Image (cartoon, rainbow, N blue to C red):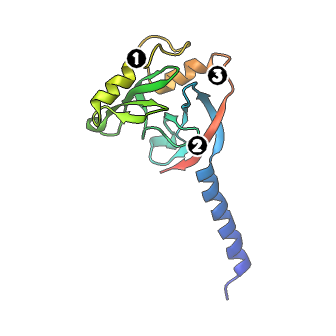
Amino acid sequence: MLNLKKHKKWALVCAGFIALNFIGIKTTCVRLPNGINIGKQAVLDLSMSYWKPDIVPKYPSGASLIPGDAWPFYATETTVYGRAIMVDATDDFGFAWRKDIGLTKRRDDPIQYDKIVSEAGELLEGIPDGILGVHIVMLELQKRPEYAGQRCRTRLIRW
């Protein structure tokens, strides 16, 4: 005979885990003035070696703006843009995001992409000159008092 109490407990544990994964937990991040956050894609990334997640630009909801790492990565008061690095280098793509327009991929709409980047303005104060990845940009901005100690929603597991 089935022990329904035991199964109900497991069902509640599973439901709680699934909810926690989609709701997310708070982890260290940088909240940019343009509305994008920079932080871990997930706490654990089962698709990566050592389960170590990428640092990515993401929406306040915790969803990633792009599927993986970005290098180079640029952030201004209104815009983030750069190159999304994929597992297969032939899949890499240039991207630009602005709150009023959303995500634009260079290969899908080169004219809109060029317009967004040309109107982006100066890099945020605290980002050193040079071609840097999103992880280095995050670390550099966290040294500044206005970005220190910030926390953002992050998925628990990515697979």
| In the image: residue 113, left or right of residue 79 | left
Q: Residue at x 51, y 39 (%)?
A: 53
Sequence-earlier tag: 1 or 2: 2
SS under mark 1: loop
Q: Which residue is mark 3?
A: 147
Amino acid type at image mark 1? Ile
**Disc 2 marks which amino acid?**
Ser
Disc 3 packing (10 Å; few <14; some 14–19; many ≥20): some
Q: Which tag, 2 or 3, sits closer to the chain's start?
A: 2
Q: In the displayed orientation, state which residue is furthest to the right.
A: 5
Mark 1 vs 3, N-terminal side: 1
Dot 3 falls on a residue whose secondary structure is loop
Query: Few, some or many C-alpha atoms within 10 Å of disc 2 (few <14, some 14-19, many ≥20)?
Result: some
Measure the alpha-carbon separation of dots 1 and 3. Answer: 21 Å
Using the image as rendered, state which of residue 65 and residue 115 is in the foreground. Answer: 115
The percent coordinates of residue 132 (x first, y second) are 43, 19
Q: Nearer the viewer, mark 1 or mark 3?
A: 3
Q: Which percent across, then down, holds residue 115?
A: 35, 23
When the figure is inspected, residue 16 is found, relative to residue 55, above or below; the finding is: below
Helix, strand or loop status at disc 2: loop
The residue sitting at 29% across, 37% down in the picture is: 108
Camera-near label (1 vs 2) is 2
Q: Is residue 117 above or below residue 90?
A: above
Please name the residue shown 66% across and 40% down the image: 26
Q: Is residue 149 above or below residue 10?
A: above
Residue underneath mark 1: 131
Q: In the rendering, at what x and y percent does residue 85 appear? A: 37, 33
Q: Are marks 1 and 2 in contact (CB under 8 Å)?
A: no
Q: Which residue is mark 2?
A: 61
